[in-house]
Amino acid sequence: MGAQSVIEQVAAGNAYVYPRSKHEHEGTKLQIVKAADRKYILAEGSGKLIDELEGETANGVKLCELSHANRLVINKFFPFTVPQAFGKQSTTIGLGDRLGIAGPGHLQTVKGRAIHPILAQQSIRELALTGRDYKQVIDAAAYAALQEGYTEGYGADGDHLKKEEDIRMSLDLGFTMLTLDCSEQIDNAAAQADEAEVNRKYEALPEAVRTHYESNYLNKTFTAGSQSIHFDAATLKRDVLVYHEAIEFMVFIYEKYIKTADRAVDFEISIDETLTPTAPGSHFLVASELNAKNVDIFSMAPRFIGEFQKGIDYIGDLAQFEQELAVHAAIADHFGYKLSIHSGSDKFSVFALVGKYTNGRFHVKTAGTNWLEAVRIVARTNPSLYRKMHQYALEHFEEATAYYHVTTNLDNIRPLKEVTDEELPKYMEENDARQLLHITYGILLQAKREDGSSLFRDEFFRTLSEREEDYAHALKKHIGKHLDLLGVK
C-alpha cells in the first residue's frame, strides 16, 4: 500500500491511530497508525526529526516504516525508547517476546507497578528458532515504548550468551543486560562423580588453584544473614571441580566486556543450565570468588531444587524449595545482588515465596508463556489454524525436544477430533498440551510448504494483528497474575 493511500485512509478515519503514540519534538509531530494490518509512523511538521526519518511524503505528511533505520532515529530524539540498565536494587522482570508483537501488552501490564521491564530478552537459541536477529528484538521493544508512550524505561537482555562473538554483538547493538551462560564451563561430571574420582581429579588441578581455595574456605564456616555455610574437604573439592573454570570465565568476560563498556550494563550470571541443583554452599563459593575479584554482578540464577520446566508450574517439594530459597536469597543479599529466577513462566506456586524471601528484589524471566497466550488467542478466534498447528506440533514434537527438557506425555493430550472448536482454548490449561505447543514454536513459525511459502506464520500473525487488543488484554491478565503473586504492587 502506497503512502498516498495510507495517508488518505488516516484522513478518512479508516486507519487506526494508537492514542498513546502521539509525540512531538521541536516542530515535528508523529504518531503510529495501522492500515491493512501494517503499522507506520506518520510524521508532519518540520525540523531535524522529520528530515532524518526515512519515508514517503504525500499531502504534507511523511509515512515511515517501522524499520531499523527509523528506530535509530527515534532513539536519537526520544531517549525513553533507548534500552537502559536498572541496577541491582530494583525489581525487574524479563518479558521475552519471541514474536516481536507482545511489547505493547507487556508495557500495559507493568505500567503503574513497582517493577522495571526487560522488554527485549532473547537467547541465540530463540533467535535461531524464530528466524529473528538482535536488531529486530530491540526495534520491536523501542516501537512498543513509542506506541504506548511508556517513558519509564525498559531493558534489553542478551540472554544466555556463551560465546564472545555473541556477547560483543549484543553490546555493540545496545543491549543493556548480559546473561552469561556458564553451562559449558561447569563440570557436570564432577557433580555426579564418586568420592574417589573427585579426589583424583582434584589432585590433578594446579597446586595454585588448590592452595587458593583451601586457604580461603577449607573447614571454615561463613554466615549470610541468619544462614550458615560450612566447607569440609569433600564439599570444597567437589565445588572447586564443578565451578572453578566457570568462575574464571565469569571474571574474564566481566573484565573484557562489562567493565570496559561505555555505559552501564546489568551483568547476570547463569549457573542454572546444569544437571544438578545448585547447593547453597556452591552458590556462596561462586559469589564469594566474584566478590573477591571485584566482579560487580546484577543478579545470579542458581539451579533450584525441583523442576522449573517450560510453561508449567513448579514440580517438586515446596517445603524443601522454600528452605533452600531462603539460603539462596540470603546469599544474594549478603553480596548485594538480586536472585534471578529462570524459566519463571507460570511458576505460580512459588511466586509468593520468591517475593517473600527476596523482599521483592528479584529478577524473574518469562518468555514462552507470552507465546502460549498468542496461541490461546488463535485457538479461540481461528480454530482451523489452531487445529493444523496442533497436529503439526504433535508430528514434530520429538524434534523439538532436542532444544528443551520437558516431561510431556502426549498420551495425556485429548485427541483433536474429540474436541469442539469452543473447547480448543482449554488445551492451554493443560500441562502436556501447553508444553507441546511451547517447545514447538520455532518449528511452527518456520514451517514451509513445498513452494517456500509459510505454512502457518503468515496466517498466525494476521490473526494476532486482527486481535491485537485481545492479545494485549490476555497478556495483562496472565503476566499480571505473575506480578500479583510475586507481590509487585
Image (cartoon, rainbow, N blue to C red):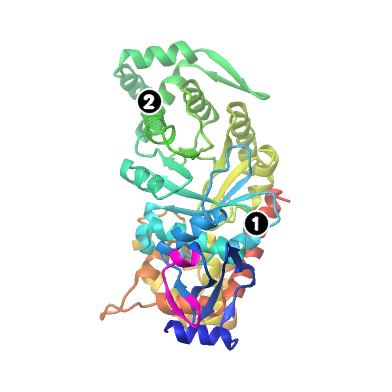
Count of numbered circles in the view: 2
In the image, 233 versus 176, the foreground residue is 176
Magenta span: 49-62
Residue visible at 63% across and 41% down?
A: 90
Task: Determine crowd level at label 2: few under 14, some 14-19, many 20+ residues with C-alpha closer than 10 A.
Answer: many
- Residue 283: image location, x then y, percent: 51, 30
Circle 1 SS class: helix
| Whole-percent x, y for residue 151 in the image | 62, 56
The amino acid marked with disc number 2 is Leu
Q: In this rendering, would 437 be left or right of 345? A: left
As drawn, 446 above or below 184 = below
Q: Position of residue 434 (x, y in %)?
A: 52, 64
Which quarter of the figure has residue 397?
bottom left
Residue sitting at x 45%, y 66%: 51
Magenta span includes 286: no
Q: Quadrant of the N terminus?
A: bottom left
Which is more foreground, mark 1 or mark 2? 1
Determine which of the numbered discs, if any, sits on residue 241 in the image. 2
Examine the rendered structure and indicate whether residue 219 appears above or below residue 186. Answer: above
Q: CA distance from mark 1 to mark 2?
A: 42 Å
Pointer 1 or 2: first along the chain: 1
Residue under numbered circle 1: 110
